[in-house]
Image (cartoon, rainbow, N blue to C red):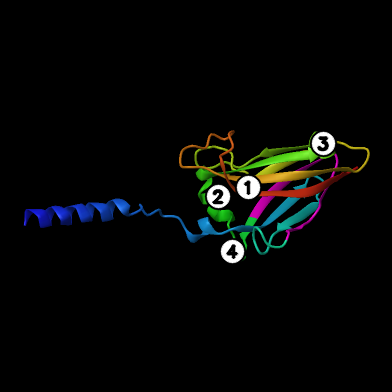
Amino acid sequence: MKRTLSVALLATLLVLSGCEKSHDHSDDEHKVPGTFILRLVGSRGDTVTARWRDADGPGGSPPTVDTLGLRSNSTYSCSLEILATDGDSLTNTIRSQGTEHQFFYSLDGSAANTVSIAITDRDSRGMPLGLQTQWSIAPVQAPTPGHVRIQLYHYEPNTKDGQTRSPETDADISLPLVIEP
């Protein structure tokens, strides 16, 4: 009897220790970002929209990418919307899980010396998020090309410090851009 009880107790402990704790995350956490839409409203009243779209996800056909055309000597307020490959919006999920996400923006080419991007939105802990940004464009005399790279990093809870990039990347895209005089 004692041996049967010990075996039953051991079996129960093994089953319980093998169970993963359930997390209260939506299905959106596991969806693949497939479309990024940048909407920029300029200080001169102009609006620019550019898309990066990979309809079949990583490893399939190459993405369709718009060139982002901006005016020199301008300021733009930018909002970023993200859709999953199935068309569902991921923007609100990323916003609500903001303490576990952060976008980083970087520029290359001649535009790197012409454009500065500042994150204007914050997560619930006051850390930068990156769905809302302010783009400042310096004056140029000739069309100035480059690329903007947008990376979405995922953090373990309470590890995001607002400056350090996480080892886990949820998305990494690049759009060509041209600054017009």
Q: Which mark is residue 131?
A: 1
Mark 3 or mark 1, earlier in chain: 3
The structure residue drawn at horizontal position 40% and vertical position 53%, both measured from the top left corner, is: 23
Outermost residue on the left side: it is: 1
Residue matched to label 2: 95
CA gap, disc 4 to disc 1? 17 Å
Element under label 1?
loop
Region of the chain picked out in magenta, as a range: 62-81
Element under label 3?
loop
Q: Residues within 10 Å of mark 1 (few under 14, many from 20)?
A: many
Q: Nearer the viewer, mark 2 or mark 4?
A: 4
Residue 145, placed above or below residue 11: above
Residue matched to label 4: 88
In the image, 65: left or right of 7?
right
In the image, 53: left or right of 139?
left
Mark 4 or mark 1, earlier in chain: 4
- Picture quadrant of residue 133: top right
Mark 1 touching mark 2, by CB under 8 A?
A: yes
Residue matched to label 3: 114
Element under label 4?
loop
Mark 2 or mark 3, earlier in chain: 2
Outermost residue on the right side: it is: 141
In magenta segment, residue 84: no
Q: Residues within 10 Å of mark 4 (few under 14, many from 20)?
A: some
Q: Magenta stretch mostly in which secondary structure?
A: strand
CA gap, disc 1 to disc 2? 8 Å
Element under label 2?
helix
Q: Amino acid at mark 3?
A: Thr
Q: Residues within 10 Å of mark 2 (few under 14, many from 20)?
A: some
CA gap, disc 3 to disc 4? 35 Å
CA gap, disc 2 to disc 4? 15 Å
Residue 81: horizontal and vertical position, in percent?
A: 65, 55
